Image: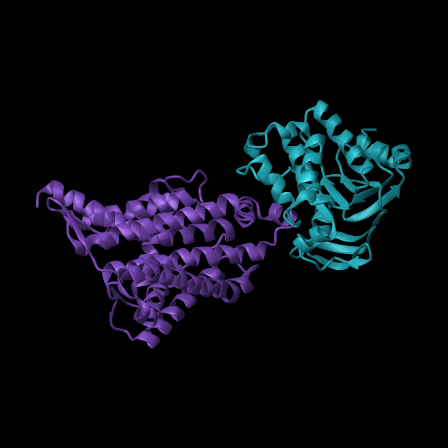
Chain colours: A cyan, B purple
Amino acid sequence: MLKVTGLHSGYGKIEILKGVKLEVPAGKIVTLIGSNGAGKTTLLMTLSGIVASKKGSVQFEGYSIERLAPDAIVRLGITQVPEGRRVFAHLTVEENLDLGAYTRTPGKELAHDKEEFLDLFPALRERLRHLAGNLSGGEQQMLAMARALMARPKLLLLDEPSLGLAPKMVDLVFDLIQQINERGITLLLVEQNALRALELAHYAYVLESGRIQLEGSGSELLASPTVIEAYLGG
Amino acid sequence: MSALDIFFQQIINGLTLGIIYAMIALGYTMVYGIAQLINFAHGEIFMVGAYLGLTIYLAIQGFAFGPAGLVILVPLIFIFTMLGCSALGALVEQTAYRPLHNAPRLAPLITAIGVSFLLQNAVMLLYGPQDKYFPNLIPIHRFSFGAVTFTNLQMIIAAAALILMGLLNLVIMHTRTGKAMRALAEDRQAAYLMGIPVNRVITQTFVIGSAMAGAGGLMFGMYYNTINFHDGYLAGLKAFTAAVLGGIGNIPGALIGGILIGVLEGLGAGYLSSEWKNVFAFFILILILLFRPQGLLGTRVVKKL
């Protein structure tokens, strides 16, 4: 579904990604782990078209998308839940959800999806008229995920969804990721909680200093001595 | 005239002027809030609105018969003036600002000044450098309460402004575009990630802000009966002051700031001397920048200017 080859990108003259190669097959959960500054967020931002790629190709369902504008990429079916949730704090929960569906035509199908996602995230239903900024961190994460789903993505990019959440919320977020995948949505997951993310993953990559250092199935990486030492606390 | 009469009279005059400033300030504040850009050519759009209104009036005045005709004529002039100014605003955005999207912040500020000169000189060439007479679009009636008078024109200006601001509020709070604008003002990158076409929403912001300024220009012409190609400069600066006073990026702030500047100017002109009236606005600007740079309603200090 998504095929990245030889991808270089960065900010100004600073190159962060130095030839990334990875694949995300349809219907799977692919996890990307790596230490701080390895380039995980830069990779997701490049895939979303926010950071311009300098070299290499990004193929999505056969289309080259590395030169497309961010809104065109959303229209093709890739949506991102950015790190730090980035909900629109001064807008209501409902307005945030509506903006998630910005690329779609309003109608029955959209209203139906909204109901469906509110069932998936019941905490949001009670707070539709609240300002998003007044939600707890966990609720904001739910909102950020529901908002991204409103675009009906084929591929969902998740950047550190469990960061800064209470343990109970972390469980819920991983449970939701599983459920989203069971609905047929492909996921590329970036996580610092390597253990949980690898347990969930069909396939996984380790990104270090802008390059893929290691790859394999989730269980293979969980058993890898390098991964155990560097990301699972020895 | 007693001191109290002067006070009320100047409040009424100041309110009218303040409403016109507010019409301009709205565009300043919206463009800043959404595109993070100070559009210093905005005052010129206001000035063009006055000339465009006059031109449209002269072109269609022959079709109006009696008071009933006026009820259609005046709104029509407003609508066409606003449409024309919207188109001009979009053109300015696309040609002067869009290509500088990734340029340092000073660059669009300089092109804005260039666009200002261009528009001023274009109007001067087309209409001449001397003051232009702006005829009364409607017969003026005066209402007197003791020594205090106000006119039906002042009421019409206030009513038109109220309607337009109500519509603006409707657009911003309840339409898809309005939601996108608010999202963009808050977090441009996150707005992009939602698939919002950021460039298009920025153009829409210019279109709406320019329509408001154009209507303001028309009100200005109707109120003062003379217009000049220089008028946008001072009015634009005062409206900018109003936007900063209210808290730049804050829409209700622009309204309050505009009215405050207008009223203070009116009072200053009434009690001191009308020659000093321009000093007040800029004195206020200095005071705000010194003591409350985030403005009256602003919560955050302006990060970049």
Q: Is residue A49 visible?
A: yes
**Left or right: A198, with B266 as reference point:** right
Residue A26 position, x and y percent, is: 85, 46
Q: Please tell me in which quadrant of the rendered image residue B123 appears.
A: bottom left
Residue B12 position, x and y percent, is: 22, 47
Q: Quadrant of the C terminus of chain A?
A: top right
Q: Is residue B39 visible?
A: no
Asked whether B34 or A198 is in front, the reply is: B34
Residue B235 position, x and y percent, is: 31, 57
**Left or right: B168, with A116 as reference point:** left
* Circle count: 0
Q: Please tell me in which quadrant of the rendered image residue B197 appears.
A: bottom right
Asked whether A44 or B175 is in front, the reply is: B175
Residue at screen point 66% across, 29% down: A138
Q: Is residue B272 above or below residue B115?
A: above
Asked whether A36 or B295 is in front, the reply is: B295
Q: Residue furthest left?
A: B1
Q: Please tell me in which quadrant of the rendered image residue A57 appears.
A: bottom right
Q: Is residue A143 above or below residue B276?
A: above
Q: Residue furthest top?
A: A168
Residue at screen point 27% across, 60% down: B67
Residue B262 position, x and y percent, is: 27, 49
Residue at screen point 34% across, 70% down: B60
**Left or right: B201, with A24 as reference point:** left
